[in-house]
């Protein structure tokens, strides 16, 4: 095992979209960066659907997804009620003025690797297979270490995603119980049915609202479709395979959708996964992306919020480096809170059938309201002219802790 001894302005733990994006934005502002990733890339990861406001942030980083063989254009999102098949399509090109008009579905293994390699190309020092075991902070900086060696940095950032290394180590991670509690998923191919072509053939993600939860159907390259079931109250003793297979078998729509296709990925499950970190930063440490907050993924907000807030965090970190002062996180936390609270409130409402029926699906009859919902679902959540978002932010959570 190589025994490294590294010094850098900023140490980033995790090379997923949040960590690699942060490293790139830091390099663009001249900071020295070391990234420590426990896995070797490429590696499987779920979460294939981006929101549109991720695209301009990636471009500012220097990454374009146009023409990438792991990315398919995503012009919208189709929401459907099971079993009535009532539907509402969100067309991202019809958002509010300034909302970016399209997004992408990506294969995360290759997307994440591309972002990490881009950070390396910009000069970030990225180490794979480097799992951090110790995180020690003092008045002058942070020391991270593991079997691979150690890193001494003025500032450190947890970008470990749902592992939330820093928060779980500090015991400051708190579960959000009001959302889905388990996601079971796999991938099918070749998906060629007329039903599939109608619903996702142009690149839309399909969100199917089912009793006590929802399902995603995401079109990928080579006629593959990622399918997942998110349950609010998982049934004891039911495996991921049983949960997904049962959901498909009980739905005439899904039977038609997956006709003559076969499973090409193993069944997987993530359980008890919505949470937030009550103490997301200290004088020398910060969190970004899912290490700060992870929400039920019904609106695919995770990667987009991670990339966009990574850009904001980079500016905050560089200001601290230049001044030599402890981290001042007030503006960054306020920006994060606005995004996370918006999606928190919207997700909570999607578990209320009467709200979905009477408010969301009715929005299709009101052009302004539909455009405002579209802007939110595009990730365009840092603006002040969206009345739907203002009402969401003004409301309180019905149950459970608030994101703070």
Image (tube, grey):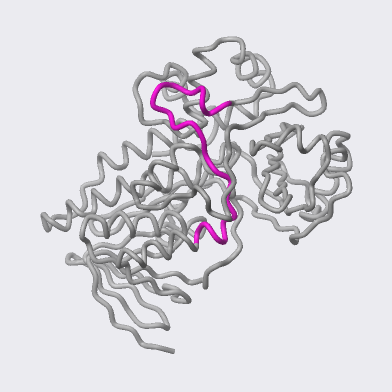
Total label count?
Answer: 0
253 above or below 49? above
Viewer-proximal residue among 173 and 371: 371
Residue 286: x, y in percent? 32, 55
- Residue at the (27%, 64%) spot, across then down: 10
- Residue at the (77%, 59%) spot, across then down: 264
Viewer-proximal residue among 402 and 101: 101
Seen as rendered, the residue at the extreme left is 323
Q: Is residue 61 visible?
A: yes
Residue 400: x, y in percent? 53, 36
Q: Is residue 247 visible?
A: no
The reply, left or right, for residue 146 in relation to residue 41 is: left
Residue 284: x, y in percent? 24, 59
In which image quadrant can residue 122 be found? bottom left
Viewport quadrant of the N terminus: bottom left
Viewer-proximal residue among 347 and 84: 84
Q: Is residue 183 magenta?
A: no
Seen as rendered, the residue at the extreme front is 67
- Residue at the (16%, 58%) spot, across then down: 321
Instruction: Look at the image and give the residue range highlighted in magenta.
Output: 91-112
Residue 253: x, y in percent? 84, 34
Seen as rendered, the residue at the extreme top is 366
The reply, left or right, for residue 218 in relation to residue 131 is: right
The reply, left or right, for residue 86 in relation to residue 181 is: right
Viewer-proximal residue among 253 and 171: 253
In which image quadrant can residue 240 be found? bottom right
- Residue at the (47%, 26%) spot, across then down: 375
379 above or below 48? above
Viewport quadrant of the C terminus: top left
């Amino acid at each position: 095992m190589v025994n490294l001894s590294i010094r850098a302005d900023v140490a980033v733990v995790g090379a997923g979209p949040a960590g690699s994006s942060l490293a790139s934005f830091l390099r663009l502002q001249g900071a020295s960066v070391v990234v420590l990733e426990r896995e070797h890339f490429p590696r499987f990861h779920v979460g294939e659907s981006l929101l549109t406001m991720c695209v301009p942030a990636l471009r500012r980083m220097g990454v374009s997804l146009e023409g990438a063989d792991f990315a398919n254009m995503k012009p919208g999102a189709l929401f459907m009620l099971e079993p009535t098949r009532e539907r509402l399509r969100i067309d991202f090109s019809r958002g509010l003025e300034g909302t970016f008009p399209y997004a992408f579905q990506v294969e995360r293994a290759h997307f994440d690797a591309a972002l990490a390699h881009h950070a390396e190309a910009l000069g970030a020092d990225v180490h794979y297979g480097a799992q951090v075991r110790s995180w020690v902070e003092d008045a002058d900086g942070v020391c991270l270490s593991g079997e691979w060696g150690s890193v001494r940095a003025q500032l450190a950032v947890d970008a470990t995603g749902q592992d939330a290394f820093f928060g779980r180590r500090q015991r400051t991670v708190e579960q959000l119980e009001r959302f889905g509690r388990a996601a079971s998923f796999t991938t099918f191919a070749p998906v060629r049915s007329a039903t599939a072509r109608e619903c996702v053939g142009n690149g839309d993600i399909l969100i199917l609202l089912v009793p006590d939860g929802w399902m995603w159907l995401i079109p990928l390259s080579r006629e593959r479709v990622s399918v997942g079931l998110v349950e609010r109250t998982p049934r004891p003793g039911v495996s991921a395979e049983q949960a997904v297979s049962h959901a498909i078998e009980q739905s005439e729509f899904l039977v038609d959708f997956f006709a003559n296709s076969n499973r090409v990925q193993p069944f997987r499950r993530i359980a008890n996964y919505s949470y937030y970190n009550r103490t997301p930063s200290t004088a020398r440490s910060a969190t970004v992306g899912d290490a700060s907050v992870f929400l039920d993924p019904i609106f695919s907000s995770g990667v987009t919020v991670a990339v966009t807030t990574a850009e904001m965090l980079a500016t905050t970190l560089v200001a601290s480096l230049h001044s030599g002062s402890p981290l001042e996180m007030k503006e960054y936390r306020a920006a994060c809170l606005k995004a996370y609270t918006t999606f928190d409130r919207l997700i909570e409402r999607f578990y209320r059938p009467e709200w979905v029926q009477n408010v969301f699906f009715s929005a299709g009859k009101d052009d302004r309201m539909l455009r405002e919902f579209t802007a939110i679902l595009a990730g365009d959540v840092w603006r002040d002219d969206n009345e739907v978002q203002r009402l969401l932010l003004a409301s309180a959570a019905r149950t459970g802790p608030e994101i703070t």
